[in-house]
Image (cartoon, rainbow, N blue to C red):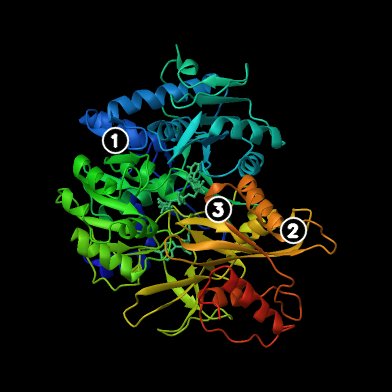
Amino acid sequence: MGYSEIYQSCQSDPEGFWMGVADAIDWVEKPSKALFDENAPLYEWFSDGVVNTCYNAVDRHVQAGRGDQVAIIYDSPITGAKDKITYAQLLDMVARLGGALQAKGVEKGDRVVIYMPMVPEALVAMLACSRIGAVHSVVFGGFAANELATRIDDATPKAIIAASCGIEPGRVVAYKPLLDEAINLSAHKPDFTVILQREQQSAEMTEGRDYDWHGVQEGVEPVPCVPVNGNHPVYILYTSGTTGQPKGVVRHTGGHLVALNWTMKNLYNVEPGEVFWAASDVGWVVGHSYICYAPLIHGNTTLVFEGKPIGTPDAGTFWRVISEHDVKVLFTAPTAFRAIKREDPAGVQVGKYDLSCLRALFLAGERADPDTIEWAQNQLGVPVIDHWWQTETGYAMVANPIGIEELPIKLGSPTVPMPGFDVQILDEGGHPMPAGELGAIAVKLPLPPGTLPTLWNAEARYHKSYLEAFPGYYETGDAGYKDEDGYLYIMARTDDVINVAGHRLSTGAMEEVLASHPDVAECAVIGVADSLKGQAPLGFLCLNAGTEKPNNVIEKECVTLLREKIGPVAAFKIACVVDRLPKTRSGKILRGTMVSIADGKPYKMPATIDDPVILTEITAALAGLGYPNAN
Ligand code: COA
Ligand code: AMP
């Protein structure tokens, strides 16, 4: 069957389609049905099935006689370390860590926060949690203590698993002091922590609260998998919304297993045993789905890469890793390729390696600009597939399913909807729009298995953020259009979320931090076009009357404050004091107009603008900051 038949078969008989797909999962008890719509518009999948994620990702492959196959390749150009872990070894590691967590009182349903860099132990920690039915919440290492504390308070974990440090080019990032500070800041305190001491920098331990990764496992018996229901949360992953309070995206066990397993062959076209490499971080959804879970559930070999596309040691690192480890499919963010292309435009490094093993490159996380796609296609000689998804959905909503049928690639489009995603372009009133017209991108409910059923501890916010604007639809927060062939084009976000180097960030959260500076009366953060990172944040500050400090001092303090409160990942480098912010007469700040000015795009003078002169002032400020397009 081709793509259209498969998509249509899922549309006309979702129950039959997903029950069939669910057969590829090893259930303790099979679910009686696929969709549970009793609480519509809240939907669940496979709720009454009984299953375990870790069993499907690890144990079943060992039982099938594939224990000697490599499950995880660790390649760390930043430390020089390399390692290979077989499925049999992985089983032992997860069963022991799971046992240690259980021995310290972690039970099914308890939450465990994980704060780790790109080391195989991060995957071991995730799988050990799912083995014992604990719900993990991984926090990206580039976030500051304050962000970690917010997540600790929301997830209320019984335990936290962390490493002593992460390693960034040129510096060791001590994670443990950040963790200690986060625990100090948070109202909720975990019962204990487990710390992986790395040789680059060891951490000071608090007696009675902090346990060494190895020490805590000594003498502990490996434990079996704890069966859970299909609607038991396997993890919570926090993502940026419009405010400083991140959204806790919940992932249910059953749908997650079924959907991710399906994507490995049908979308990425890999067979069990082949090497699949997602060059991302375990702290992001791409890392959850395609570094940890999907490749392992499907019996692939996954690659944990601790490095950067450039500088570790050069722009040839990706090619070295692909050829050395026989990578069949690479998945990364366009930013990584923009960085490589900038450093090695002629592809000199590409020519140094035998890349004949590589079959396809997948890009996601941000808009893939046609220049980058073309460069990658020319250099690698394989299909470069853009696909569109979000933390909320857990896997691609729109893609080119090369395992089913390779559809013609149209530059600038992530191609077509995947089974179960009825993607529509809606006008403000919620009516579907004709081909070629720009509107809000929404997906008809129910969303398919593996997508978010709700937000952790925040059902009302789930309704408000995703379901209210267009009744009967999930609102994605992206805007775009479809062409005559049904190809989708993603053009912009409709909310305050920006995308910096494939990292999703909230300008609202940044504004909250800047507004907390004692001299700042009012502020606005916008995402301006950046040739490397896609977008970069830029903050405008209006100061309190009578402020004595010079503007440049306050600007610097704000940059530091934001790094301290949100973290280096925000890449917030520019704050600029202005007299006034452009607003509508009702007081709404005209952020979109400021973005257009910075990016040199034409804009219409908003009819409701309070004082047009302010736009001239902002234009001058942007030109002063080196935005030459602002004129
Ligand atoms: N722990 C601590 N700090 C981290 C971190 C981590 N896990 N990850 C990033 N940071 C820090 C960086 O050191 C940097 O700090 P600096 O301001 O002191 O230099 C800051 O956060 C921004 O990091 P990054 O976004 O990585 O930018 P960069 O300028 O260091 O590197 C690229 C640029 C293009 C090489 C890099 O952004 C990249 O590899 N992008 C790929 C994106 C990706 O994989 N996205 C995942 C979604 S699919
Ligand atoms: P995240 O939840 O971090 O994965 O970010 C999701 C957001 O990133 C989406 O809502 C889009 O705005 C953007 N995004 C992800 N993939 C793509 C893509 N292929 N093209 C354009 N934007 C994308």
Image coordinates of residue 546 in percent, x first then y, are 85, 62
Provide the secondary structure element on which disc 1 rests.
strand
- Residue 370 position within the rendered picture, expressed as x and y whole percent measured from the top left: 33, 70
Q: Earlier in the sequence, mark 3 or mark 1?
A: 1
Mark 3 residue type: Ala
At label 1, the amino acid type is Ile
Ligand 2: quadrant of the figure: bottom left
**Residue 155: x %, y % from top left:** 62, 40
User: Which residue is tagged 2?
Assistant: 550
Sequence-wise first label, 3 or 2: 2
Nearest to the observer: residue 392 or residue 314: 314
Quote the CA–CA distance across marks 2 and 1: 52 Å
Is tag 2's residue or tag 1's residue first in the polypeptide sequence? 1
Residue drawn at 67 percent across, 31 percent down = 189
Q: Residue 405's image quarter?
A: bottom left
Residues under numbered marks 3 and 2 in contact, where contact means CB atoms less than 8 Å apart: no
Secondary structure under the numbered disc 2 in the rendered image: loop
Of the two numbered discs 3 and 2 in the rendering, the one whose residue sits closer to the viewer: 2
Which residue is situated farthest in the top direction here?
Answer: 219
Mark 2, residues whose alpha carbon is within 10 Å: few (<14), some, or many (≥20)? Answer: few
For disc 3, does the CB lie below 8 Å from ligand 1? yes
- Residue marked by disc 3: 570
Residue 475, relative to residue 257: is it above or below?
A: below
Q: Please tell me which residue is depicted at 74% across the width and 53% down the height of the picture.
A: 517
